[in-house]
Image: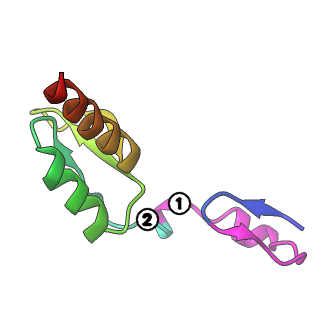
Amino acid sequence: MDFIHDFGMLEENKLEAAVLKKPVRELMSPAVSVGEDTGLLHAATFLQEHQLNDLPVIDQEGKLIGLVSYTDIGIAMLINREIRKI
């Protein structure tokens, strides 16, 4: 049985070669991203609304500069909470 991240286990049937050779442009969704100055709450909401695990972050020129995830946002919020307690 095969395993593909985000899909779990697949049936034992192998994919046909034509499917494997399909260009990604035929499978892509429109790109979504946030700017580097986007707030954590907005980014978390955006992830949820678009059902994403990772969110591309772009600079002012539209260049990809990184990814942010729920984990990144959660850690940032927890660190901020701990700092405010001290």
Q: What residue is shown at x 65% (from left), y 57% (from top)? A: 5
Q: Examine the rendered structure and indicate whether residue 67 appears above or below residue 16.
A: above
Q: Examine the rendered structure and indicate whether residue 86 appears above or below residue 38.
A: above
Residue 58 in magenta? no
Element at label 1: helix
Q: Please count the marks in the image.
A: 2
Q: Which residues are magenta?
A: 7-25
Query: Which quarter of the figure has residue 44?
Result: bottom left
Q: CA distance from mark 1 to mark 2?
A: 6 Å
Task: Work out which quarter of the rendered image holds the C terminus and state it.
Answer: top left
On screen, residue 58 versus residue 51, left or right, reads left
Contact (Cβ within 8 Å) of mark 1 with mark 2: yes
Query: Which quarter of the figure has residue 23?
Result: bottom right
Task: Work out which quarter of the rendered image holds the N terminus and state it.
Answer: bottom right
On screen, residue 76 versus residue 85, left or right, reads right
Q: Examine the rendered structure and indicate whether residue 6 appears above or below residue 80.
A: below
Q: What residue is shown at x 84% (from left), y 78% (from top)? A: 11
Callout 1 crowding tier (Cα within 10 Å): few <14, some 14–19, many ≥20:
few
Q: Position of residue 21 (x, y in %)?
A: 69, 62
Q: What residue is shown at x 29% (from left), y 58% (from top)? A: 31
Q: Which residue is mark 1?
A: 24
Residue 16 in magenta? yes
Which residue appears farthest toward the front when viewing the image? 86
Q: Which residue is mark 2?
A: 28
Give the amino acid type for the residue marked by disc 2 in the picture. Met
Foreground of the two, 71 or 61: 71
